[in-house]
Structure formats: structure tokens, C-alpha cells
Amino acid sequence: MTNGPARRRWLQAAACSVLPACVLGSGPAAATLPEVIARLRGSVLPVGTYSPTDSPRFGFRGTCFVVGDGNLVATNFHVLPPAAETATGARLAVMAGRSGDLGQLRMATLVGSDRARDLALLRIDGPPLVPVALDGAGSAREGQSIALMGYPIGGALGFSPVTHRGIVASVTQIALQAPTAQQLDPRAISRLRGGNFEVLQLDATAYPGNSGGPVFDADSGVVLAVLNMVLVKSSRESALSQPTGISYAIPVRHLLALLAEQPAAAPR
């Protein structure tokens, strides 16, 4: 990657159009939550796999949201299918549009990941979508009103984004899971040396299908974090029947680091 004039111009454009809270010091103006939801719902999408021989052909795995140049989406790394599944011919796919038909499927490719923080960045085919605004200032604070959007029960009732409201209950530390010998690459070693990192503990109801979805400021819609996990009482099934209302999210600054690693988009 070079740091020439083209690269600098791309970063400046991304800062102004995608990361206003980071660079300009002020995000979108305050709005009502219904207005924020209406603005974001087209940018929060189901992610999964597509196989023409499966039934259904789209296999839902989680939630993602549009970032960067409009052809990138962010989600959790654990949402991605295992290698054995893609080896059978299934492809990563994102369902864009509200109709829920297969004509809206966009094929996707993994272009960046941070396994230690459970983040993945995918590039999708087709024309760009509307990206969300990301909070690069790290402004999340305890007691802040937030909302999260995603697909908590997948496509059981059709793919329509669902919003839950809550607060940031705590900004706390989380311990990194020790990698196996096979996972000890330079990046994993660097993460271990860095120690624990902060996550947001949310007083908000979320479900397994919400994984990878955005956590955003309820007044402005600026995305603060990526929903990562839900505290469950006993089993995955109990997360649906007996939700604890305690969820965790990865601060969006780690997603910004992944975005910064991406090459400048080619002119359209």
C-alpha cells in the first residue's frame, strides 16, 4: 500500500462522507428514533450463504451493515460460515433490498478480519449502498441511550430489520481467548501482547441473529459498536425464550482500523 496523493484523497473523501463524527467533530443532527430507524434500515442487511442446490437457497447466519465506499459491509467473524460449508459450493452473500427475494442477493468476499475482536469486513458485488456514519471519536459513555438493529430470528417471519432500545450499562474489559498453536500468527501474538480490550456492556435485549449488527446512538444514528454476543442463561435456545437483556458490543474504532487497511476504491 502506498501513501501517495490518490490514497490521501480517498481517505479524505471517506472521512467526510462516512466518518463525520471522527473527523468533523459532529455527527448527524439529533433526530427522533423513528427518523433514525428509517434512515438506517436500508443499510442493515442479512448476511449468510447462497447455494443454488440448497433449500432455502439463502442460508441466514447473522446481521451486517454497510460501511466505507458503500460496497463494504461489516459483521462478526463468527457469523461467517466454516470452511467446510464453503468448500461444498456455498458462497458468502448479503441480501440487499426489502423485498427478500433472491433477486436482491449480492455475492460477498472476505477482504479483512480481526479474529481477536470478532470482526469481519466483506466486499459485495453491485452498485454501492448507503453507508452508515461511524463514531471514530470513541464517544460511547455509560448511561448513553442506544439502539441496535438486526435480524433476531432470521427470516422466520420474513427479512425485515428489528430495532431494540437500551443503554450503555458499562464500558468494561474483556479477556482475549488464547489462540491455539495453529492460530499463533504475528497478528494474534500482537493482540496477546496488547492484553485485554474494552467492550460495551449493553442493557438491551438482543438475540443470536443480531450478531454483527450495529449499535448506534439513539438520537443521531451514529454507529458506536458492533454487536458481538448475548449473555445466555443456559443454552442458545434460552436466549430466545428467556433473554437476559445483557449484550456486549465491540467499539467501532476497531472496525475503523480494518477500514484503514483497505486499498483506495477505484473511481467509478
Image: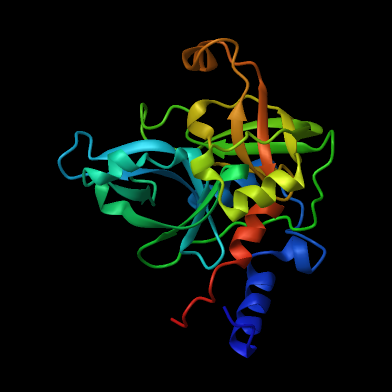
Query: Is 158 situated above or below 25?
Result: above
Q: Quadrant of the N terminus?
A: bottom right
Residue 55 picture location, percent across and down: 19, 33
Residue at 36% x, 36% y: name it: 60
Colour convention of the picture:
rainbow
Query: Is 137 situated above or below 127?
Result: above
In the image, taking residue 177 as reference, residue 202 lies left or right, namely: right
Of residue 72 and residue 132, the one placed in the foreground of this image is 72
Residue 9 picture location, percent across and down: 64, 84
Residue at 74% x, 31% y: name it: 201
Residue 143 picture location, percent across and down: 84, 33
In the image, taking residue 9 as reference, residue 83 lies left or right, namely: left
Residue 34 picture location, percent across and down: 63, 42
Query: Is 27 situated above or below 226?
Result: below
In the image, taking residue 36 as reference, residue 151 lies left or right, namely: left
Q: Quadrant of the C terminus?
A: bottom left
- Quarter of the view holding residue 99: top left
Of residue 98 and residue 208, the one placed in the foreground of this image is 208
Does residue 109 appear in the picture of this structure? Answer: yes
Does residue 133 appear in the picture of this structure? Answer: no
- Quarter of the view holding residue 168: top right
Of residue 249 and residue 167, the one placed in the foreground of this image is 249
Q: Residue furthest front?
A: 181
Q: Residue furthest bottom?
A: 5
Residue at 59% x, 16% y: name it: 232
Residue at 36% x, 32% y: name it: 155
